[in-house]
């Protein structure tokens, strides 16, 4: 199996970073995470963040950049990513009023524009899914697939959130294989869910419904670069949750 990096999406520990960003990064590095994916920078200047990551031997995988920031502060976001050495910029989410078919037609145009700007700067643009991309169609094709069919791969790559893929009723293993070669980043999370549309729980790795070991194998075969742990909501203190998930990764992937 090809060795993939193990990262953490910092949104998972947002309460901890709000109190002490630097201290939280030190704890994450001590757990054994190899990289982090940002969702904001806690007001830390890019040069200071770069130096801290180098000290902790943490890779800057990339950053989740909201739609408003992409529209209004693209140059500043590019400069920050370049300084910290991040390779990826990811649109993570769309507000509810920006998800209908006509809105998506506009997003297709804008995403290609953003992708070109990032590519010029040596950064790869990607999109991170939830479930709503499987609920809207463009010309009879679900948005998730239309997005990647209509935008050239050099301008848009896939960051697949495998938990939301399964929750949407799609076979996660089949979808990983479908996007092999265009899927550098995989959000690895576990869901414990009832019927679609009912209350769901994001849980520590190994405590939910997803076939995580086959998913990791499929990710390796699809040339994924980073497995990124994310837990949207934690029942336990988030730092305890991500430590438990890292132990699961050590026992079921890293030490195999």
Image (cartoon, rainbow, N blue to C red):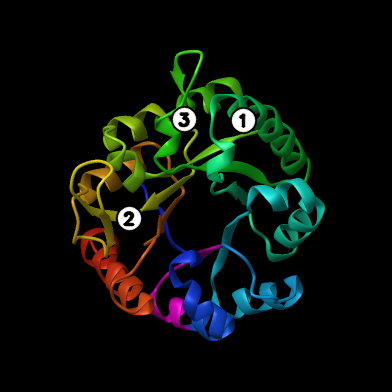
Q: Is residue 19 in view from this perspective?
A: yes
Q: Is residue 66 left or right of residue 221?
A: right
Q: Are marks 3 and 2 in contact (CB under 8 Å)?
A: no
Helix, strand or loop at mark 3: helix
Q: Tell me the magenta residue range.
A: 27-38
Q: Earlier in the sequence, mark 3 or mark 2?
A: 3
Instruction: Name the one closer to the observer, 43 or 61.
Output: 43
Q: Residue at x 63, y 53 (%)?
A: 65
Q: Position of residue 54 (x, y in %)?
A: 62, 75
Instruction: Name the one closer to the observer, 182 or 100.
Output: 100
Asked which quadrant contains residue 12, the reply is bottom left
Dot 3 surroundings within 10 Å: few (below 14), some, or many (20 or more)? many
Q: Nearer the viewer, mark 1 or mark 3?
A: 1
Asked which quadrant contains residue 174, the reply is top left
Mark 1 lies on residue:
103
Q: Nearer the viewer, mark 3 or mark 2?
A: 3
Query: Would you say residue 34 sits in the magenta stretch?
Result: yes
Mark 3 lies on residue:
144
Q: Position of residue 172 (x, y in %)?
A: 29, 37
As measured in the structure, the alpha-carbon distance from the residue carrying label 1 to the one carrying label 3 is 14 Å
Q: Position of residue 119 (x, y in %)?
A: 72, 40
Q: Is residue 248 left or right of residue 242?
A: left
Asked which quadrant contains residue 105, the reply is top right
């Amino acid at each position: 199996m090809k060795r993939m990096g193990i990262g953490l999406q910092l949104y998972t520990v947002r309460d901890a970073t709000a109190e002490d960003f630097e201290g939280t990064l030190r704890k994450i590095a001590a757990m054994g995470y190899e990289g982090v994916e940002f969702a904001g920078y806690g007001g830390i200047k890019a040069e200071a963040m770069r130096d801290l990551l180098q000290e902790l031997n943490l890779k800057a995988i990339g950053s989740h950049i909201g739609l408003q920031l992409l529209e209004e502060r693209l140059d500043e976001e590019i400069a920050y990513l370049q300084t910290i050495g991040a390779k990826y910029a990811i649109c993570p989410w769309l507000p509810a009023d920006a998800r209908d078919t006509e809105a998506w037609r506009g997003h297709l145009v804008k995403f290609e524009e953003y992708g070109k700007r990032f590519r010029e700067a040596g950064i790869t643009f990607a999109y991170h899914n939830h479930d709503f991309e499987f609920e809207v169609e463009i010309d009879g094709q679900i948005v998730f697939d239309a997005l990647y069919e209509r935008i050239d791969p050099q301008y848009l790559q896939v960051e697949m959130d495998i938990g939301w893929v399964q929750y949407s009723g799609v076979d996660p293993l089949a979808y990983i294989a479908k996007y092999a070669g265009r899927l550098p980043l995989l959000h690895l999370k576990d869901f414990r869910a009832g019927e679609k549309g009912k209350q769901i729980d994001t849980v520590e790795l190994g405590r939910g419904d997803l076939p995580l070991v086959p998913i990791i194998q499929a990710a390796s075969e699809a040339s994924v670069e980073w497995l990124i742990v994310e837990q949207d909501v934690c029942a336990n203190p988030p730092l305890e949750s991500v430590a438990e998930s890292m132990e699961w990764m050590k026992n079921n992937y890293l030490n195999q």
